[in-house]
Image: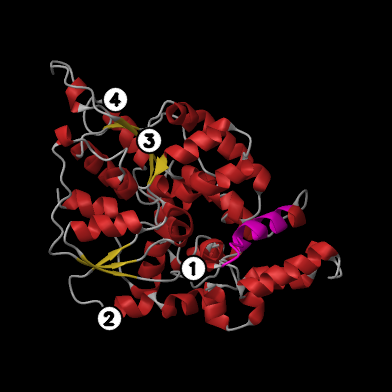
Amino acid sequence: MCPSYLATKDEKDVTRGRARVLQEAVNGTLVGGLDAPEVRESLDLCLSCKACSSDCPAGVDIAQYKSEVLHRTYRGKLRPVDHYSLGWLPRWGRLAGLAPRLVNGLLSWRPLAKAVLWAGGMDTRRTVPAFAEIPFRTWWRRGSASHGVPGASPDTLPGRPVTVSKPKVVLWTDSFSDAFDPGVPQAAVTVLRAAGYDVVVPDEQACCGLTWISTGQLDGARKRLGDLLSVLGPYAVNGIPIVGLEPSCTAVLRSDLLDLFPDDPRAKAVAGATHTLAQLLTGPDTAPSDDAGWTVPDLSDVRAVVQPHCHQHAVMGFRAEEKLLTDAGATIKTLAGCCGLAGNFGMQKGHYDVSVKVAEASLLPALAEAEEGDVYLADGFSCRTQADQLAGVKGTSLAELLAARL
């Protein structure tokens, strides 16, 4: 069921209502076509969560339609300011990475932060997440240069004997993990190496263009995904698995990439090679070999409130994660429904109240009912941000949970 409809109970916000409006806009019944105000009103509260693509019996992906409508509406025109502030977020993250302490210090002054939010078309009740003082890719390069963890495998250090070849795996670091939460990919490196993999982090940045897609900047998304195919394509076509950590970005490689590059064999190879961490560790063709001596850490003392990301629910599914957690002994409460932030949606001006209302349907009550010591487990950066900003609860990722128990 559409999260915004659950929040508003307005027929225009259900999948059926949005599909009907779009149908009338396309067939000429609605005056103004896709530029009609009814179309903008109908799509405004779509969280682009993609739940409809898997939950709707007809498999209607309103998020995809919304991106296409925004693309056609603003092609060659000046866009809303939040399309630049949020739609170009990876750019701002890389810029902030040049002087993260300075940027964080400036934004810690609330009057300035509110001015930045207002100027960027965002709700001033939100806060700007802190940028990582050392982005993951910087951390990785420094480790590689010093021939120590994280960049170089200990088995290839000078003076070490060459050991049996390990299966390679590409750790693909998205813009959110790199710029905001590098502890997640750092933990993934630890887990993957413990499981017997040779971890590869490509030298070139590979952005999936998610924020360009969600704001309807499809030409920009194609450019970034074209660059990504140049980076990840050679690994995929040679049978090397790719691990994605941010579910929304991973879903782009599994779904949107094929839609935007339907005739490119590299796109099919990358989509087929891309896995979540749990899928890699439990997959029949990708799981650690018996020689690796890997066992999932004991999680029998873990009680967790688990928030599956909407895009993961819709595209990859959450069965591998649930199986890994329960087989390791964890007691989990898996939430159904969206966290309410949904990437850029909950940050945009005019969406805050609905974003909170959506969170009140499942996330916030579960966090309020959690006992002391319970873990809030969410691989989605937006899910962790929502819990932090609305409930003061710090979340953790699956990679961090496993790494801490090795």
**55 over 136 or under it: above or below:** below
Q: Which mark identifies residue 241?
A: 3
Task: State which quadrant residue 359 falls in.
Answer: bottom left
Q: Which mark identifies residue 369?
A: 2
Name the residue carrying label 1: 111
| Residue type, mark 3 in image | Pro
Q: Is residue 406 left or right of residue 340?
A: left
Residue pictured at 49% horizontal, 46% vertical: 254
Magenta extent: 57-71
Q: Is residue 228 visible?
A: no
Crowd rating for badge 1 (residues with CA inside 10 Å; few <14, some 14–19, many 20+): few
Closer to the camera: disc 1 or disc 4?
A: 4
The rendered magenta stretch, by its main secondary structure, is classed as helix
- Judged from the image, the secondary structure of the residue bearing numbered disc 3 is loop
> Of callouts 3 and 2, which one flags the residue occurring earlier in the amino acid sequence?
3
Give yes or no for residue 115 being in the magenta stretch: no
Distance from the alpha carbon under mark 1 to that under mark 4: 41 Å
Towards the viewer: 90 or 397: 397
Name the residue carrying label 4: 145
Q: Is residue 252 visible?
A: yes
Residue pictured at 56% horizontal, 39% vertical: 225
Crowd rating for badge 3 (residues with CA inside 10 Å; few <14, some 14–19, many 20+): many
| Residue type, mark 2 in image | Glu
Towards the viewer: 131 or 27: 27
Residue 313: % across, % down: 44, 60
Residue 124: % across, % down: 52, 70
| Residue type, mark 1 in image | Pro
> Of callouts 1 and 4, which one flags the residue occurring earlier in the amino acid sequence?
1
Crowd rating for badge 2 (residues with CA inside 10 Å; few <14, some 14–19, many 20+): few
